[in-house]
Image (spheres, coloured by chain):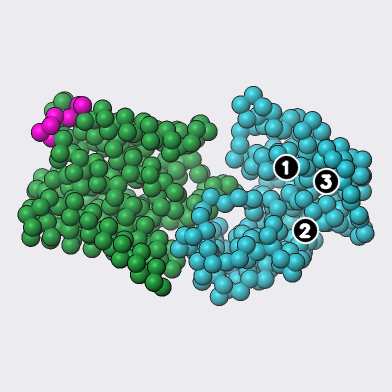
Amino acid sequence: MNALVVEHLTVRFGTREVLKDLSFSVPTGTTLAIIGPNGAGKTVLVRALIGALPHEGSVQWAPGTRLGYVPQKLDIERDMPVTGRDLLRARARLLGASATDVQAALARVGLALATMSAPIGTLSGGQFQRLLVAFALLGNPTVLLLDEPTAGVDEPGEERVQQTVRRLVDEGVSALVISHDLTLVYREATNVLCLSPGHTCFGAPRAVLSADLLSEVYGAPIGLHLHDEPRA
Amino acid sequence: MSPAPSGLVLSVATAVAAGLMGCYAVMRRMTLAADALSHVALPGIGVALLLGVHPLAGALVALLFGAAFVWVLEQRTRIPTETVIGVVFSTALALGALLTTSEHLMDALFGTSGGLTRWELGAGLVGSVAVIAFALGARDQLIVSLVSPDIALTSGINVRRLDLFYLIAFAVTVALGLRYLGVLLMGSLLIIPAATARRLGRGLTSMFAVSVGVALISTLVGTYVAGALGQETGPCIIVTAASCFLISAAWRGQA
């Protein structure tokens, strides 16, 4: 069974086609990594998938899908007197999640409840990023959409977020992850979708992450040293 | 010149509404837009006076039109909102000044004291209660939407509709204060208390509390001072609010 089926997806900004005739699917309980150079349309793709951008083609989520989304960029300024607890409680109330669910989400990303009493502007970049992941985990999502979820997160924090996502996928959650970390993509992804102007590819990491194909996608030689075996 | 008790009741209700709505405006980074939007009431007042209609009814229609304009602009175009608002709403102010007779212009720009009819008080209180109910009732949706409209979308929030309701509530709040603050000063009652609260608040609830508190103190102290000095109420309220902001800036600067 598929968590997501995308057929002939095209997104235009004015006359410019950012994504053209894209088709792929995400089986339930698997991880799709989305890779490509800056400006290739990775974030545009995710925003089209959640219905934030007008598009042609079809995007079919499995019935009963609950999305947890970590965007690349936020609209709120960090110097507002808003605490992590304010944000988590707001989303929890909207989704009918309990205080216990909030604590569980924080525990999964390794954030202390006490940290959440401070204004978000006082959190470090990594703490804030982990808060966003906890925010996405509220409401027991069936699909996680993560746009560079560990950007700015320190090594232990990054490992914890990766473990959390891995555990959720093992529990049957599907994940779509935009990442520039090709080693991580090789190790964790079930499938890889690569986007670049004029070139897209889709397949298992072993098939897609070849030096030749990556050089074609990124338009420059990519030195990729892969030590770990893919999970799938 | 102190207002009649009925006017003071409505001023207090308006202060609460403005304190709450101003917090969202500051968090949405639309302080300039908020101030400029209040200017669009002036041509509405001018047209209403020409047609012999209640000037505040004309102002409300113009403000709702302005709110819808901002909403369409945000939804349909990629033009920077602040730029277009700067051009269009300044033009509205100029048109309003041409349409409004000099006899009414000063009242429209800076507000005036005076009693209210029962209808004016009733409509004003209904408007205030509706805005306060929206600001508190839609708090969670507004906050998640402020963090990221995309997250809001994945949380099941109709972001476009929420934005429209917010702008309508904002327009109603501006209309509520036009009588005693006028087109030029009403934006300040929305922005200054919230800007003060942004500096003093330690969380969302305390930000709302400080903003409403500053708006209320400004309204009550400003009204009293205006009465004692024989001045117009609006400027005294805004000077009081600005004093609160300066004190907060000095206090946080030392902290």
Mark 2 lies on residue: A169
Tell me the shade of chain B: green
- Give the image location of residue A38, x and y in percent: 72, 42
Q: Is residue A217 left or right of residue A225?
A: left
Q: Circle 3: is it few (<14), some (14-19), or many (20+) Cα within 10 Å?
A: many
Name the residue type under label 3.
Answer: Val
Is A5 in front, or is B59?
B59
Which residue is found at the position 32% from the left and 33% from the top?
B90
Q: Which residues are magenta?
A: B98-104
Alpha carbon separation for disc pair 3 and 1? 17 Å
In this rendering, does residue B199 appear at all? yes
Q: Secondary structure at mark 3?
A: strand
User: Chain A colour?
Assistant: cyan
Binning the other alpha carbons within 10 Å of mark 1 as few (below 14), some (14 to 19) or many (20 upward) gives few
Residue B150, percent from left and from top: 58, 47
Give above or below for B225 relative to B103. Answer: below
- Residue at numbered disc 1: A38
Q: Chain of mark 2?
A: A
Label 3 or label 1, whichever comes before in sequence order? 1
The label shown at residue A192 is 3
Query: Is residue B190 toward the left or the right of residue A93 in the image?
Result: left
Report the residue at 39% width, 35% height from top. Answer: B85
- B100 falls in the magenta region: yes
Q: Which amino acid is tagged 1?
A: Asn
Does the magenta segment cover residue B121? no
